[in-house]
Image (tube, rainbow, N blue to C red):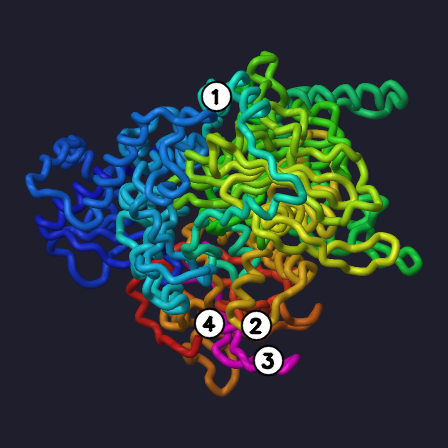
Amino acid sequence: MDDWVDPNAFRKLWNKLIKSGWKARQPTGLEVDYTYVKPGVVGKLRKNQLNAEYFIGPKELWEYAKREGLVTDVLQYDAAPPSKKPPMGKLAAYAAAKQRANTLQSKPGVVGTANAKATPHEGASVTSTTPVATEQAATATSTTATATEQEATATSTTAAATEQEGVMGGHSSTATSRKQGEFHEEPSRKTQQMIWTASTAMTFWTWKTSLVPLQQMISMSRLSLLPMVLSLRTMRKLESDPVFDDESGVFQQDDAAMRGLGESGWKIYDQDHCADRSLSGADLYTGRWGITKSAAAFADSPLSMLFYFLPKALWKNITAESEAYQKRCIPAIAEKTRERQLAVQARDPKKTVDDLDAIVDKLERQKSIREHEILHVLGLLVARTLCGHTDDLAKHWTVSEDGAVPRGTFGRYTKRERFRTITWFLHFTSTGSEGGTTDKAFKIRPVLQVIEKTFRRGFRLGPRVSFDEGTIPNRSQYNPIRVYNKEKPHKYGTKCYMTCCAVTGYCARVEVYLGAEPDKKKREGASQRAVIRNISKTFEGLPKRRLIVADNFYSSPALALALLPMGFYYVGTQRVDRLGWPKEVMFKQKRRPQYMPRGAYRIAHGKEYPALVATAWMDSAPVHMIATGCSTVLTHVARKDKRTGAITQVPCPQLVADYHSGMGGVDTHDQIRLQRYSIQRYVGFKKYYRQLFLAFVDMAIINGFILHRIVMKQKGERVPSHAEYMRRLQVKLLAVTSVSFRTNRYCEDLVNTPLQSQEHVLRSTKELYEAKSGRRKGDKKRRQFLCKVCSALSPPKVKSFESRFYCHECSITMGGYVPLCNTVRRTEAGNTLTCSQIWHGWRAGGGGGIPSHLRKKIRFRKRKSGEDYNSNTDDGDTDDSS
């Protein structure tokens, strides 16, 4: 049965049922689904009447409605009649923006792009209409998507509303007249109202309540969701990106026009007259930017940040694919096992050989891979980056010390063979999935689709954007997208196009380079198309007027002119052999002569394109740059003398300073990712795509670390180091249990706040026994059970305390009895909390009262027949001291 229910159809059904007297009860305790009650049913609900008098979750209610024939008229999607009233307010702004976009689309653009629709000054109100294919795939699972799903994943073509971009603790260079509290999480507001998934429920809620303070927002998150939201499937099967569409219209360079530009399209100003051509810079974006409100709600906890970028739905999908891959490998593993047994028997005839069917049957009975086990493996790899045995990964499971080298600790959390099993079968997509013959990155495509969306929604880039290539080190000969780059510290690896914040280094988008096109014509302008494609997708539905900073691998006059009508300015170093470059502006010397002052420069100004500027600046060697929308006013940059180490101020035009201040974004992200605590570099796999997966996990961790530092600084709290952040993350990862994936599957429940005490009230057990001896022989007494917290924290061979109290909600969630003490028992280390408070603080993610290596001692006892802790009619004593 499909868990997903069409939100539009369910909304119609629920409106129909409300009119007939149906009621909805909010979830209690750790439950996540609303309870839908029939008319006339009041008081406590009886368990034996489940799916008769009441239904839990939209799925059960929908199945009941189908059986009763209540959904026949609901499934008809009649279009709403057009309104006769003229559009007002935001609707008027949408209509005006759409009309303006259509008008600009009909005008011929300058050289560069077929998608050019707006001038730089109009870029804030007009956006590209090209849908983001990967964002569609990130929220869709099935190739047979419904019309509602297609509408929910389509990108908005209106940007009048997108300028009201609410950013939590963001930067603002000037005050604006727009609303400061409005939150724009995704390009389309209609999208947020139509689709409700785990990734967008928190987004829509924060947009609606953006004027609420952050702490109040976090505490109110559970109460603000509609009944229909809570049981929708958060992530459906992921499809491959249509990244192989014809992109010939994205960037078309007119070679004849560029040759004419290079020969006679420039006016040259030498170093003696360059001051005569003093251009002012363009009006860059001045709105709010920085961390979004949804990301700020999770930034306190490293684990919450990881789930924000790599949601639980993705881990469930990885688990399902890994388990399916493990089953597909059973016949091959069985044959290899039998071959080894036969080889051993050939050397020793006393050895026995199992039948092939028996081996297959034994392999099929193996324990399936669970989501929390994959996170435990990830936690151990994070711990390895902090204190790794560089000689061998297996050293972490050693049980004896070797001189000053301590024994391994990984065995406390996962057995070595289990660790190997999980890493052997780690898989992300089906081998026979569509795109496997054309998409070289199809093995890792589901992960790429998810991070493309989550990276973008966590941070709004500022006025200066850094674009450059990054490298994922990997020398595997089986990697079909391995390249060689002599300019990088790691020569061999997978190349990625990265779009980062020029100030913080936050990566807003990453695209894997799939290799050169076999067609020579398509190879021309590939780097320029990469810039246009990534920048347009990054700012889809967002205000433009940003300055794009890139190096000479991408720069060309054609690219600068192509970005200009899209609403973006450009600055970057330039290769002098590309078409359109003015040869007259260049210095003849390859090195600065002694008679020439350091900082001399020349300027070339475009005759037909007033915003286009080329410059040759003499540092220790000539530096050539191309720019649009940048100032040529004289300024200074700091340069260090290699011989003396002295810092000197060298004169230069402003565009050189803009390049120096904006180019380091990608390099900053790469340095943090590769030169400190990289999971990918501390472990190697034969399967290249597992190595790539760990690289993307590294990127998600670095993005979370950057946002965590921003939030801590805004709160005035101590900013942790990278090592402290990784240490906290591995502790949280190793504490994840299977319960974490049965409950709190939604974004707002991941916030690191303790559960309210009234949701978990201790109850006294109803089970009685008769005293066999003593003064009260024959009296009835309530039976007591070993406290879960005391059992975990008590020393070996020491009996823990017993308690007659238990947590009803936790017993339902855990599937077993959860006895807890209602008094302070564990007084070591100055503890002042009861066992119930320690337990619920740990389960909520807000406390660390139970060490990770002791939590495996906790077991849950199934109740005997006749005992029912799911009943809501427990009339035993209660204790609210939890």
Q: In this view, does 164 lie to the left or right of 662?
A: left
Cα–Cα span, label 3 and label 2: 24 Å
Residues under labels 1 and 2: Cα distance?
A: 48 Å
Residue lying furthest left in this view? Answer: 84
Dot 1 amino acid type = Glu
Are discs 4 and 3 less than 8 Å apart at CB?
A: no
Mark 4 to mark 2: distance in Å? 48 Å
Q: Position of residue 552 (x, y in %)?
A: 65, 34
Pointer 2: what residue? Answer: 717
Magenta-colored span? 809-837
Q: Tell which of 468 and 149 is nearer to you.
A: 468
Q: How crowded is mark 1: few (under 14 residues within 10 Å), some or many (20 or more)?
A: few
In this view, the mark in front (4 or 2) = 2
Residue 880 falls left or right of residue 492: left
Location of residue 749 in the rendering, given as x and y in whole percent from the top left corner: 42, 57
Residue 831 - label: 3
Report the amino acid beneath label 3.
Asn
